[in-house]
Image: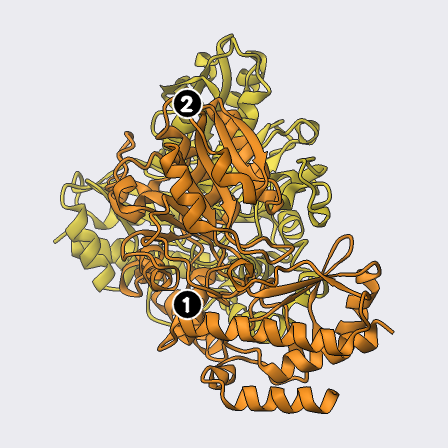
Chain colours: A orange, B yellow
Amino acid sequence: MSESLAGKAAALDAADELAKHRELFALDDDTVYLDGNSLGALPRHVPARMQEVIAHEWGELRIRSWDESGWWTAPERIGDRIAPLVGAAPGRIVVGDSTSVNVFKALVAAVRLAPSERDEILVDESTFPTDGYVAGSAARMTGRAVRPVAPGEMAAAAGPRTAAILVNHVDYRTGRLHDLPGITAAAHAAGALTVWDLCHSAGALPVGLEAHGVDFAVGCTYKYLNGGPGSPAYLYVRGDHQGSFDSPLPGWNSHEDPFGMRGEYVPGSGAVRGRVGTPDILSMLALESALDVWTGVSIDSVRAKSLALTDFFLECVAAYVPEGRVTSVTPAAHGERGSQVALRCDDAGSVMAALIAAGVVGDYRRPDVLRFGFTPLYVGFGDAERAARTLSTALG
Amino acid sequence: MSESLAGKAAALDAADELAKHRELFALDDDTVYLDGNSLGALPRHVPARMQEVIAHEWGELRIRSWDESGWWTAPERIGDRIAPLVGAAPGRIVVGDSTSVNVFKALVAAVRLAPSERDEILVDESTFPTDGYVAGSAARMTGRAVRPVAPGEMAAAAGPRTAAILVNHVDYRTGRLHDLPGITAAAHAAGALTVWDLCHSAGALPVGLEAHGVDFAVGCTYKYLNGGPGSPAYLYVRGDHQGSFDSPLPGWNSHEDPFGMRGEYVPGSGAVRGRVGTPDILSMLALESALDVWTGVSIDSVRAKSLALTDFFLECVAAYVPEGRVTSVTPAAHGERGSQVALRCDDAGSVMAALIAAGVVGDYRRPDVLRFGFTPLYVGFGDAERAARTLSTALG
């Protein structure tokens, strides 16, 4: 059995058009890295670029780099690099701050566009915790209440009292892909606005922000976008909302004339309105450099490989692991699956420790989940087969 | 005249105990860099450290670095490095987000500690704009109003309706040092809380946060702390406010059990409560490395040299520049002066361009101010003399 799946893996890798992209990443050790949905691997060219940024742009040009090295315009420029990966038009995305801070901006701005009788914010009940905490703060500060709703019931739950809904596109724990087109359409039919959290989908599958009329979206850049630890997040605002985007964090960077140093706040036009304070240039330019790995890559080919990888991993797990020892909590249906496989087992903590010791790096999520992220740009089918084989050993 | 001032500069440089610190910075070109109050110069050892962070910690250890390389605890660890420079006790400062975002956290938290009949927030009328914009948002979202007050009248203005006051320790334009002990004491006497913005004072002069009982403080790290472009800001919360600090940005990083992934928000204890989302590690670790230049430096010696430098620069300007051609808007009294000299002249824009072309880098602040920042760790008296001499040429 092992040999036939290993052979199948080799054949799949040989036919994989994206396989050559693995060479772009610093993955020279004998590790199967299935934690790119927590921290993406380092693109090989980033260290040299960052030496230039630090030693030359900061060290030699110093203050001149805000203009001459394009630092000032980096948040919008990098936003436009991310845009095609999530189906956004140019000029809609700005990079900066953390995902949590961007959830706050987007949700408060969404609620401010709703009449006051729309007094509830719907949040998917399985949300990554920070989204729920920040939604609670946004509700408290705008006189609304948060109502947790199962993602599958979100479309039906949106109603005349709904100001905005906040949903994770892919559940961080189970890997379940939520119905962005359907929930967005239902929210709009109910007169509510949508905020989508793309942390676990951007760079792994097509999002289609413009195509589906999403109002606001946020996401991090250090998972499938490989921007580096804590690299800045981004904020998407639909074109027809940009002019009325009313940020709760109106910093000087979003002013129409930031160097006018005027006492009165007059927001700028377009994506810049989502900016706040001085952007963290080193983290931001590492992200910009990291995005070079996407040159010539179509997100549809990434999605196709992602599904093939997770299918094959589940096939290997089924073949190698005794039935009932682990249970997949990731949906089998392609239309409901992100780019990870989450397996439940009672001793997940010690099993993941054994896996990591054996060179297969995934994530343990309390209390009982083994999480394996599949980044199509650098994970191969051989990796998936080895991971499943190592898992079966680790399970004892 | 020129020769005697040049001679005096040489003597002052020879006697300067801090002069040797200049070698720690990448300042090998023939530039007099008087813009460290906008972007501090690069400490020479930072590029090598950042190569290690990027190539090894991110590139090789990857996700393990959150624990093994101390990434997760960096915000508090670096806060404790900044603490002695601003007179804070350990465990009070957390690093992360931009200054603007931290003003929002601090001001909202301050207002939340005040009874609702305290319905006004006092902001110094000459504030750096972002503080005013963010104060406006904090006021709007907490049902208060902002009242601009001249800093000199702030102590008298605090009264029974004052919830909180927000003051810049040093004015970004004029370089005027505001009376932190006096205003803080007056605010407390009136039952109000204080938020101090230390952007233009931290690293240039003693602040004495604990000594003067400051309630909250924020500051950037890319000016006199040399942390790099857009390096993360920090938030100080006085010890007896930490337990009641109620952040408007309750992200998962400030939870008492961040990896418990619990739906209910329960804030952690101590400085960690000021955190929000995932910290921008590359920018943050560059800052941490940059702080090494402070080893063995006392902030009192920095202050003494700063005042000597700005005194001497003003002396040289008086000697070289025809009377009336420029007017200093920086106070002559030491007790009212930060670490910069701002000179007003009608054609300041073109004069600064000529200065920069001649290798003297300062800042032009619209409409008519030439701003020269003096960073005692790397600016010498010879630099000050050359800057004044070049200025006299540029003024024609």
The secondary element bearing badge 1 is classed as helix
Q: In which quarter of the image is residue A87?
A: bottom left
Q: Which residue is drawn at 40% across and 56% down?
A: B381
Q: Which residue is drawn at 58% across and 39% down?
A: A132
Quadrant the C terminus of chain A occupies: bottom right
Q: Which of A34 and B61 is in front in this view?
A: A34
Residue B140, which numbered label? 2
Is the residue marked by circle 2 packed among few (<14), some (14-19), or many (20+) residues within 10 Å?
A: some
| Residue type, numbered disc 2 | Arg
The secondary element bearing badge 2 is classed as helix
Q: Nearer the viewer, residue B395 or A221?
A: A221
Q: In which quarter of the image is residue B83?
A: top right
Q: Which residue lies under the disc numbered 1?
A: A59
Quadrant the N terminus of chain A occupies: bottom right
Q: Which of B31 and A259 is in front in this view?
A: A259
Q: Mark 2 lies on which chain?
A: B
Is the residue marked by circle 1 packed among few (<14), some (14-19), or many (20+) residues within 10 Å?
A: many
State the image coordinates of residue A152 (x, y, percent, origin top left). Answer: 55, 44
